[in-house]
Image (tube, helix red, strand yellow):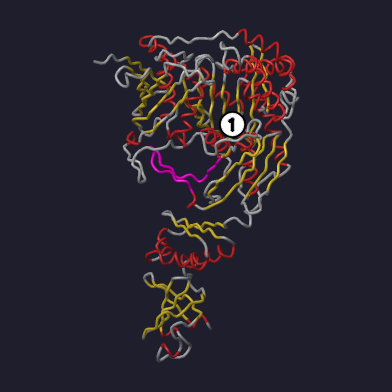
Amino acid sequence: MFKVYKKEIEVAGKKISLETGKVARQADGAIIAKCGETVVLATVVGAKKVNPDMDYFPLSVNYQEKYYAAGKIPGGYFKREARPTESETLISRLIDRPIRPLFPDEFKNEVQLLPTVISYDKENEPDILSITASSAALAISGMPFMGPVGASRVGFIEGKYVLNPSKSELENSSLDLVVAGTKDAVLMVESEANGLTEEEMLNAVKFGHEGFVPVIEMIEELAKECRKPEWTVEKKDLSEVKKKLEETFTEDLKKAFATRDKQDRSNQISEITDKAKKLYEEDENYTDLDVNSQLKNLEKSIVRTDILKNKNRIDGRGLSDVRPIECEVGVLPRAHGSALFTRGETQAIVVATLGTSDDEQRIESLDGLQRERFMLHYNFPPFSVGETGRIGTGRREIGHGKLAWRAINSSLPTKEAFPYTFRVVSEITESNGSSSMATVCGTSLALMDAGVPIKEPVAGIAMGLIKEGDDFSVLSDILGDEDHLGDMDFKVAGTKDGITSLQMDIKITGITFEIMEQALSQAKDGRVHILGEMNKALSASREDVGKHTPKMEQVNVDKKDIAAVIGKGGATIREIVEKSGAKVDVNDEGVVTVAAPDEESRNIAMQMIKDITAKAELNKIYSGKVMKIMEFGAFVNFLGKQDGLVHISELADKRVAKVTDVVKEGDEVKVKVIGFDRGKVKLSIKQANS
């Protein structure tokens, strides 16, 4: 019934298999990929007809994780997988980025790629396997895909690169890098690092590239055996349109791209576009999309040629120059920490808020319930580019926020050293290139302004590339138009000494390691320059948190004292909260965290906790309160909730007939610890007053 095709290979000691022909046979391409007990089903279907109004390639990649893959039932009231999680969105982008550039420009058919995790062993990560499975599904589909692509994860453990490390191995790695590309070139890099050098990062990319070449060869072998008939892609002859537009609008476009103000430049180009469409409004042979595509090609040619031949950029800068930078901190009076970062026509207001462990984000995933103490949210409202549009959080916002998160994460203090939870929000108020890197810079400043003791300031810069044949130019701090018309978006973030995050997307079929090396070197110079400008506003974290920040302190108590701090039914901890106004949290390890609106509140709570957990010291005098009268003595409460017995013989220097002759319930007295008897404390009023 089934005609099954299967290939296997061993990579880094792990067997990877690809199989097709049994499942999802009505899709254009379907692959079951396995590594260990992690299994991914990737399917791809393409529309057979083109939407004539489509002016872009409508590729959609929707990575999905099914909870049954890990033997789990989704939490909450709605017991089924719903909208994509942040992790699923990020992995969807990870798969999309190396695949999209490998389709021809004239291919405008809708394509839907669905990689689905159907088994997960909690050791072999499904993201790399999903890229492999997706690439293989496209390779056998017959679509005009100029792949296949492969992917690797690279770790750096004890000075050695590790190919496709397991989840447990990654915990000890100073690098988590994903690289994808073809046999000849790298197309995509995504990474988080702990201050690695440019050379170490470049070698990691090379190591990862070498690691996935055998996987590509396996996909090619599979495709030879079962590839479906190739699709026919029609290419419309637009040479006449191209020639006419060049003759009519070249000079006008050159003038527009010589205009340095973004809005003025955009208005001029918009007027030229309207004029170009009017030239062909009576010609039924060509659509507005045909005219617009050729006009965009002309724009691209003008800008790229000027950069390559004359080294002239749109705004007049040199290839390695960074736009003017202005930094301010403490711009919002009630925020815990805030910064305004402006670089040219790109600007971000970044705000840091500090909270308690109650504010940590709870994330449900195939690995189980996790808690995240650092959140970074990036917002890109349409007014930032002078437009109207939809308000909301899309894939771009999630992706840019995570990139900045990776850049900052390794510089944050540990929870033990600084017990706060952090939420950073970046509001992009102007955008003309690399707002994600503005977010990195603004986040570093806002956290330092909030008094978070980060290890070192972090800055980021976006690099671009113009490449024609063997001739290329690497651009520092790219503008939006340079990004749109260029061949590479290469973002590097880090401290003055090392890289903390690297993201690269290539829009052509790949770049050489020579270009990457130059881009990394040029990026370091730019990053150091930006850090110098940031240091003018704030060069290190403030010594203490701000006056509006919750005052937090942690104290470790003996595990035996946890019950005493909480009290019966939580009575004691409620009393501390009521009397002090602070929030108190006790974990199973005996770590007590106090978060208060001010120092007075914090001090009251801390003193009450210390009183409860303090141990009575022999011969030390304490203040106490008579709680109960007995014939043989009085029980006195001291050290918070601790009681001790004052025997009748220790009430006074003289003989006492009745206890009530000396003390009554409620009396405040001084007592001295004179001994211990099987865990009970023996006290003396007589000796305390002598």
Give percent across and percent down for residue 307.
71, 18
Say left or right for 163 vs 21.
right
- Residue 21's image quarter? top left
Q: Residues within 10 Å of mark 1 (few under 14, many from 20)?
A: many
Query: Which residue is tagged 1?
Result: 196
Above or below, 585 relative to 241: below
Magenta: main secondary structure:
strand
Q: Would you identify the image quadrant in which residue 382 lies?
A: top right
Q: Considering the image in quadrants, where does the N terminus appear?
A: top left
Depth order, front residue of 300/640: 300
Along the line of sight, the residue nearer the viewer: 294 or 620:
294
Query: Can you give x and y, in whole percent of width and height, for residue 466 in the image?
Result: 65, 18
Q: Work out whether 346 lies above or below 57.
A: below
Within the magenta stretch, is there residue 6? no
Q: Is residue 400 left or right of residue 34?
A: right
Depth check: 90 or 450 in front? 90
Residue, far front: 282
Q: Total label count? A: 1
Taking the view exactly as shown, the residue that stands out farthest to the left is: 1
**Residue at (35%, 36%) from the top-left corner?**
67
Lateral position of residue 341 relative to residue 405, left or right: right
Residue at 55% in and 46% down: 423
The secondary structure type at the circle numbered 1 is strand
Residue 203 place in picture, x, y as percent: 56, 23
Rendered position, 23 above or below 551? above
Q: Kindly identify the residue that appears in the image at 67 percent across and 28 percent down.
A: 479
Query: Could you tell me the amino acid type at mark 1?
Result: Leu
What is the magenta range?
360-377
